[in-house]
Each structure stands twice: as structure tokens, then as C-alpha cells.
Image (cartoon, rainbow, N blue to C red):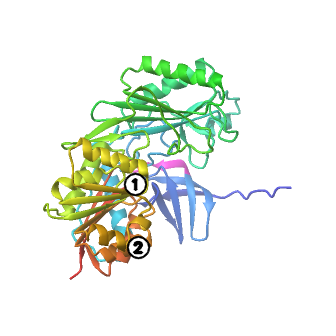
Amino acid sequence: MARKRKELPILENIIITDVAAEGKALARIDDMVVFVPYVVPGDVVDLKIVKKKHHYCEAVAVNFHKYSAMRTEPFCPHFGVCGGCKWQCLPYEEQIKYKQQQVLDNLIRIGKVELCGILPILGSQKTKEYRNKLEFGFSNKRWLTPEEIASGNDYVQPGAVGFHTTGSFDKILPIEQCRLMDDINNRIRNAIRDYGFLHHLTFHDQREHCGLLRNMMIRNSNTGELMLLMQFCITNSHEQKQAEDLMDYLSEAFPEITSLLYVNNQKFNDTIGDLNVVTYKGNDYIYLCMENLKFKVGPKSFYQTNTDQAYELYKVTRDFAGLTGAELVYDLYTGTGTIANFVAGQARKVIGIEYVPEAIEDAKINSQINGIDNTLFFAGDMKDILNEDFITTHGQPDVIITDPPRAGMHKDVINTILFAAPRRIVYVSCNPATQARDLAMLDEKYKVTGVRPVDMFPHTQHVENVVVLEKRV
């Protein structure tokens, strides 16, 4: 017999006091810290505990006694369920204040390094429709809201297209309107959903690994180009015909699509790096522009998803690098060479290193189409390529720019940077916590002389941060 789960208590008239990590806010009850989503400091609420640990617990607000004067009206109809933009109820000017503090708290608490030259965060001019890329999943299991479940009604679930909800890998929350991208994303997504219902197409089953409609990715560009990549799970000739009919429909219904692509993915995950992409109409790429440069972006390419704010991020990076035209620059984790090509005009030579071979090929192409001839790119694992022999062969860098993934830099990479002994290091990070950890390992030989957070993702807890370090004398 299953043990009955203990019902956790309701806490009444609790004042929310601060903003916490992961897009949550917090309250303090005696010695207990309580983390709560979708509330803001100043709200007075009743809380239902959903998880309890020794020194903290997690809760949800079940009743509001008083709304904070700080609170603002969320603009998304899916707010509170989708979970993608948890800070919509917090005014943007308050969001960036908390992000600035989050960065400094991480650098001080984790890095324990002396900080100089702290600049105010660069907020995003656009707080809606700022993304150039969105992905939506298809599922034959639609997420039901607590209200729908409580009603006891039998809901027909022919399928859903939208976002995965937190804690559920096989259910999709249907999205009718997403304001993170131009409205084209809503028109295309909803048209595919309606076409699927009308023509009885199967929506993917994550557990059984079957169902034609699996995933879709939309990319737009400041050049006016538009890419749509459909991800199908095609197992027979009938499904192949269904997929092609849908692609024909999309080609006719949305002539603004300049790159119409699809993949057949029968794997157990949605990654497409090892799959063949079929160009059904138009080009297999789009261009994005930055200053006097243009960058070729394919379906597998990485490019910062906030186009306008990426430009601000790279300008901070270039300014921190302090280039005069005489420097040898190493650009670590170069991706498609965006930063390498962006700073190449002010450097003697730029060497980029990246793990993904396809990204390196894009980086080389991006140099060619922009007439840049002072870049050199290498593909491979950073900790394996960047070693003492590499530096001996290619020269000691004057400046190292590093933009690692969220996990930060491998210890071997940090040791090689210390061996290379550049005059200056510019560290771009999407995770100030791992950045702080890495700064602590560099602190013996390098001093932080500049810090500038850059907000790339309004209404979320995520923030980029750029730090410049100078070699200690």
C-alpha cells in the first residue's frame, strides 16, 4: 500500500521581500527562506508549500491579500503557466537593477576577487519581439492547467504545438501568442497546427518515438530574410507525402519564407547536428548584419538570439579589448566567428577556436564574405587544441577573448591561458556564477579592471556579463 503523502501547510499573509535566483522571489519566515515564482517584492500572499528542505522551501502563491506597488501587468496570455518569462510582473527598470546586483553578488561571493571599473548594466531597447529565433515542440499530449484538471471535464487532445513546461518532457503547453518574436512566429505556428488538425497529421509522442510533427524552428533577420526548419519523424512513404504536402502549403501560404527546410529525425532527442537538412525552397541560410559586416547563419549555426543587443554586447567586448591594430588576438569558443570577425578590423591577426566543425566552416565563410583576411580558425576541443605547443606555433597572444558555454572554462584551458600570459583577457559570460569561479583561478596573475553586465533576455533571470582583466605587474 502506497504511503499517504503528508499535506504541507498553507502559510498566510506572507510578505515577499526580495528577488531571488531562477526568476523567483523570496520571503523569510523565522529562519526559513521561501522561494516563490510569479510574485514581486511587496506582494502579500498566502503560500502553499510544494517542497521543503532543511533550510529553505519552495512555494506557490494561492491567494493575494495585497498587490505590490512595484507590480506591473504581464503582457503574455500564457504568463504563470509557460514559465519562460517569469519576470513579466516586474517592471523592466527593476529587472535590470536586480540583474546588476546578481552579477556583483556572484563575482563577490563566488569569485572573491577585487572589482574595479564596474559599469551600469546595458538594458535592452526592445523588451518585446527581441528574439531572432524561436523553437516550438509538437506533442500528442497537451498540458492541462490545474483549472482544467479540477473541472473534471474530458478534454480532447488531438495534439499541441508550443513549449515544454517545467518538469515535463513529454507534454506541450499550447501557445497561441508569443511576444518574444515578431508576430510571424504566431501566424506560422498556428497555421501549421490548424493544418495538422485539418489533415489528421500525427503529433509526436515522446515516449513511443513516433508521430510526424516533431519540432519547428523559426529564424528572422534584420535583412528581412526568414528561415523555417521543420523537424519531422518520417517512417514510411505515406508520412513522406504528408510532410511534402505540408511544405508545399507553407511555401504558398508564407511567401516571405526565404529558407524553407526540413529534417527527418527518428532519434530519441531533438538535436539536429548530425542530421541531413533538406532545402525545400530558397537558400539553406539567412544573413544577419552588424555594423558593416554580414554573417551567414544556417539551421545549425549559433548566433546570439537578441540581434540588436548582441551588437551592444560585442561593442563592449571590443572596447574592453582595447585594440590598436598591432595585437594578436585569440578568440576562444568562437562559434561562427562573430566576435573574431567583429574585432578583426582593429587587430593584426585573430585566431578563433571552436569545438563544432560546422561552426568553424561558417566562421571561415563569414570572413570571406566580408573580405577579412587576418583571421584563422581551428576546430576541436578547447582543452585539447589550446596547449603550449599551439601557442609556441601560432604566437603568444596579446589579448585573449573568451566566451565559453554556461559551464565556464575547463581548468586545463585556464592553465593554458595563464601560460600564454596575454596582457589582457576579456571574458564574456552567460553565467556570472561560473565566470566568477574562473576569475578566482585567474586572480593570482590578473586583476579585474572592468565589469559591464548586458541584458540580452528581458523578463527572464538570465544576464550576460563582460569582464576585462589586466596582467598584474
On whether residue 66 falls in the magenta region, the answer is yes
**Residue at left 33%, top 67%?**
104
Q: Which of the 4 image quarters holds residue 158?
A: top right
Please indicate whether residue 193 sits to the left or right of residue 294 in the image. right
Quarter of the figure with the C terminus: bottom left
Reading the image, the residue beneath label 1 is 462
Query: Disc 2 marks which amino acid?
Result: Ile
Q: Main secondary structure of the magenta part?
A: strand
Asked if residue 292 shows in the view, the reply is yes
User: Which of pointers 2 and 1 lies earlier in the amino acid sequence?
Assistant: 2
- Give the vertical position of 439 relative to 135 (above or below): below
Residue 248 location (% of width, % of height): 49, 19
Please tell me in which quadrant of the rendered image residue 450 appears: bottom left
Counting labels gives 2
Please give the label number shown on residue 261: none
Q: Secondary structure at mark 2?
A: helix
Instruction: In the rendered view, tell whether residue 135 sits above or below residue 166.
Output: above
Q: Residue at x 25, y 51 (%)?
A: 341
Q: Which residues are magenta?
A: 61-69
Reading the image, the residue beneath label 2 is 110
Q: Nearer the viewer, residue 169 or 282?
A: 282
Q: Is residue 395 left or right of residue 74?
A: left
For the question of whether residue 98 can be seen, the reply is no
Q: Amino acid at mark 1?
A: His
Residue 274 on image: x %, y % = 52, 45
- In percent of width and height, residue 393 lies at 30, 69
Q: Residue furthest right?
A: 1
Of residues 352 and 21, the one nearer the viewer is 352
Q: Looking at the rendering, in which quadrant would you find the N terminus?
A: bottom right
Q: Is residue 89 left or right of residue 8?
A: left
